[in-house]
Image: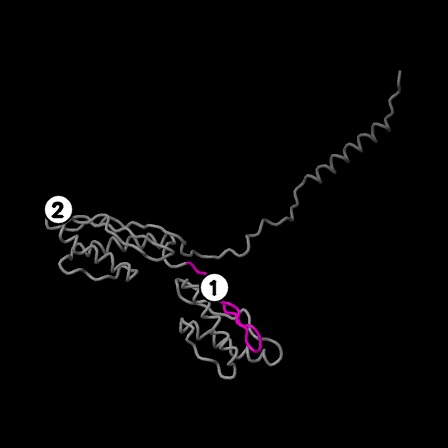
Amino acid sequence: MRKNHPVRRVILTTVATTSGVVLLVTLKPDAAQAPDAAAPGIAQGKQATAGNHTATGDAVRTKYGDVRVRLTLTDGRITESEAVQAPEGGHNDDITKMSVPTLNKETVTAQTADIDTVSGATYTSDGYRRSLQSALDKAKKDGLLGRPTRTVDGKPVQTKYGPVQVRLTLTDGKITKSEAVQAPEGGHNDDITKMSVPTLNKETVTAQTADIDSVSGATYTSDGYTKSLQSALDRVDG
């Protein structure tokens, strides 16, 4: 009969136990691992949604029938307004035909519900405005109003002392920021750039055009700035 060896069993048991501990340690998740960070560059807050969208207002009861407005919005602006419901039948048809086209046109022009009553169509005009306001409220809630914020770079313009390039930030179709992403640098150029560019940036936001004055003592930089600015504005309009 083969004799058992107690010492050998102890060694094998110890090895097996140690292997199990190593395996558990290997499989244990890293407790110090931080959760995934938010992706960089994601803008906070709600901006207008680009593209074409519609928003339909509530049906508003008037003395002569319901009025309901539907808006078409393109890149955050009202491009069309129409009454999908309006008083009809008999004389109501004449009132609707006379008033609604005017109300539609005024809405696109005003971009708000602050539009005038059409003479001879008081009830229809009032119902139209109220339905229009509810459509605007829905569009605003869904982030469809207001143009998206975007940046536009002008062309680099070479000057006697170096290139000048302007970048515009536009929000709701207006210039909210102007900056020189390239400007003359090195030696005395640094002083000229530091003195002139902030003024040119500020004047651009105020003027909303490239018709801004040259900064005294920075003629070349000012000229390059306005040329690059104009090319950025041309891209906006294009």
- Please state the horizontal and vertical placement of residue 139, each as a whole percent of the image: 34, 53
Residue marked by disc 2: 89
Secondary structure beneath disc 1? strand
162 part of magenta stretch: yes
Going from the N terminus, do you reach mark 1 or mark 2 first? 2
Taking the image as shown, residue 67 lies to the left or right of residue 72, namely left
Badge 1: how crowded within 10 Å, few (<14), some, or many (20+)? some
What range is drawn magenta here?
A: 148-166
Residue at 76% x, 35% y is 19
Residue marked by disc 1: 152
Residue at 60% x, 81% y is 188
Secondary structure beneath disc 2? loop
Taking the image as shown, residue 58 lies to the left or right of residue 171, namely left
Q: Nearer the viewer, mark 1 or mark 2?
A: 1
Residue at 71% x, 40% y is 26
Taking the image as shown, residue 189 lies to the left or right of residue 126, namely right
Farthest residue to the top: give it.
Answer: 1
- Please state the horizontal and vertical placement of residue 78, each as a whole percent of the image: 32, 57
Figure check: 133 above or below 152:
above
Query: Magenta region, mostly helix, strand or loop?
Result: strand
Amino acid on which disc 1 is placed: Val
* Distance between mark 1 and mark 2 Cα atoms: 52 Å
Taking the image as shown, residue 225 lies to the left or right of residue 131, namely right
Residue 29 quadrant: top right
Q: Dividing the image into 4 quarters, which one contains the C terminus? A: bottom left
223 part of magenta stretch: no
Which mark identifies residue 131?
Answer: none
Residue 140 quadrant: bottom left
Farthest residue to the bottom: give it.
Answer: 217
- Please state the horizontal and vertical placement of residue 146, each as a whole percent of the image: 37, 59
Amino acid on which disc 2 is placed: Gly
- Please state the horizontal and vertical placement of residue 6, each as a whole percent of the image: 86, 26
